[in-house]
């Protein structure tokens, strides 16, 4: 299972007021795409990299496809390596958590 979230600043105007007026929304409606359903984190505010953000869109992907599972494993490993490298760089630069 993979959950992907699109974030927006919490101070940004609510996208619900402008829903359906964007170019992306008009093209999607013309192609017969379903409207994005509200998600469980729509009214919550989170802190991400020191900034207050809201979850604009949330997509959950579940699959037994071996290729997708392999890609997910590789992304998880890459995330771990990048986090470890950033901690090492912070140590070298003398920054503290």
Image: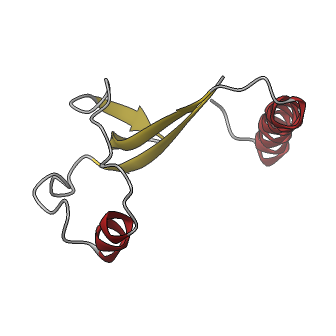
Q: Residue furthest bottom?
A: 23
Q: How many marks?
A: 0
Classify residue 95 by image quadrant. top right
Classify residue 66 by image quadrant. top right
Relative to 94, say whether 72 is above or below.
Answer: above
The residue drawn where x is 27% and y is 35% is 38
- Could you tell me which quadrant the C terminus lies in? top right
Q: Residue furthest left?
A: 17
User: Is residue 2 toward the left or the right of residue 24 in the image?
Assistant: right
User: Is residue 57 toward the left or the right of residue 13 in the image?
Assistant: right
Q: Nearer the viewer, residue 95 or 53?
A: 53
Q: Position of residue 92 (x, y in %)?
A: 85, 43
Relative to 21, say whether 97 is above or below.
Answer: above
Give the colouring mode of the picture.
secondary structure
Q: Position of residue 36 (x, y in %)?
A: 33, 45
- Could you tell me which quadrant the N terminus lies in? top right
Q: Nearer the viewer, residue 1 or 14?
A: 1
The residue drawn where x is 32% and y is 77% is 23
The residue drawn where x is 41% and y is 47% is 7
Q: Residue furthest front?
A: 32
User: Is residue 4 toward the left or the right of residue 56 in the image?
Assistant: right
User: Is residue 96 toward the left or the right of residue 81 in the image?
Assistant: left
Q: Position of residue 42 (x, y in %)?
A: 26, 33
């Amino acid at each position: 299972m993979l959950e992907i979230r699109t974030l927006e600043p919490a101070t940004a105007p609510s996208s619900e007021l402008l829903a359906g007026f964007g170019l992306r929304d008009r093209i999607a409606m013309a192609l017969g795409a379903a409207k994005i359903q509200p998600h469980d984190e729509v009214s919550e505010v989170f802190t991400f990299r020191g900034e207050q953000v809201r979850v604009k869109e949330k997509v959950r992907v579940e699959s037994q496809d071996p290729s997708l599972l392999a890609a997910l494993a590789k992304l998880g490993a890459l995330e771990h390596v990048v986090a470890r490298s950033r901690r090492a760089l912070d140590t070298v630069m003398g920054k503290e958590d």
